[in-house]
Image (cartoon, rainbow, N blue to C red):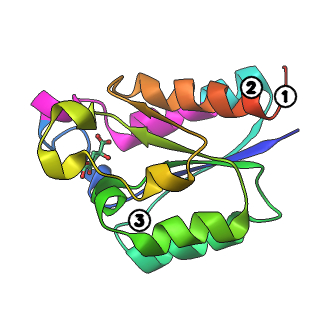
Amino acid sequence: MPSLLVLNGPNLNLLGTRQPEVYGRVTLTDIEEMCVAHAKLRDVGLSFQQSNHEGVLLDAIHDAKGKHDAIILNAGAYTHTSIALMDAVSSVELPMIELHLSNVHAREDFRHSSYISKVALGVICGFGARGYTLAMDAAISHLGHSA
Ligand code: DQA
């Protein structure tokens, strides 16, 4: 059974109360529950993590090697700044799908550039919380797994 790491970066722990007009009212716990249910349905393993600290996110990516088969990464604002996260993904050589709740391309200019995109298999953005299960399905399909 393939295993997915869903990794969330800074401020995503505040979902539900953070700019609901942009990110909706769904909490990260709600999203985790959706992902756990979807993993059961699709017969894949899942680890769901969040950190506000770049180094902790780096460690999580390093630890994924040998434990998980693909990474779904919502790096939050680190998307637009972190060469270190980009390098970590390249180093572990696992397929990674970049994910954003909001459509970053319809927002401020600084959100249009992404270091994460340079090493991503693909990008899903603008579908809110539903993007998480879409990203899981994209990863599962890439891995050639059927439940
Ligand atoms: C985000 C988009 C980023 O630009 C922002 O900094 C976030 C959330 C999203 O999920 O839409 O923290 O990654």
Q: Is 108 displayed left or right of 76 in the figure? A: left
Closer to the camera in the image, 129 or 73: 73
Q: Where is residue 114 in the image (x, y as percent from the top left)?
A: 36, 53
Label 1 within 8 A of ligand 1 by Cβ: no
Say which mark, if any, is on residue 141.
Answer: 2
Which secondary structure lies at badge 2? helix
Closer mark to the observer between disc 3 and disc 1: 1
Does the magenta-highlighted stretch encompass residue 27? yes
Task: Inspect the magenta stretch and tell me whether residue 129 lies in it.
Answer: no
The residue under the point 36% across, 22% down is: 127
For residue 92, what is the image quadrant?
Answer: bottom right
Can you identify the residue that label 1 sits on? 144
Q: Which amino acid lies under the numbered mark 3 shown in the image of this protein? A: Ser
- The amino acid marked with disc number 1 is Gly
Residue with the mark numbered 3:
51
Residues shaded magenta: 20-36
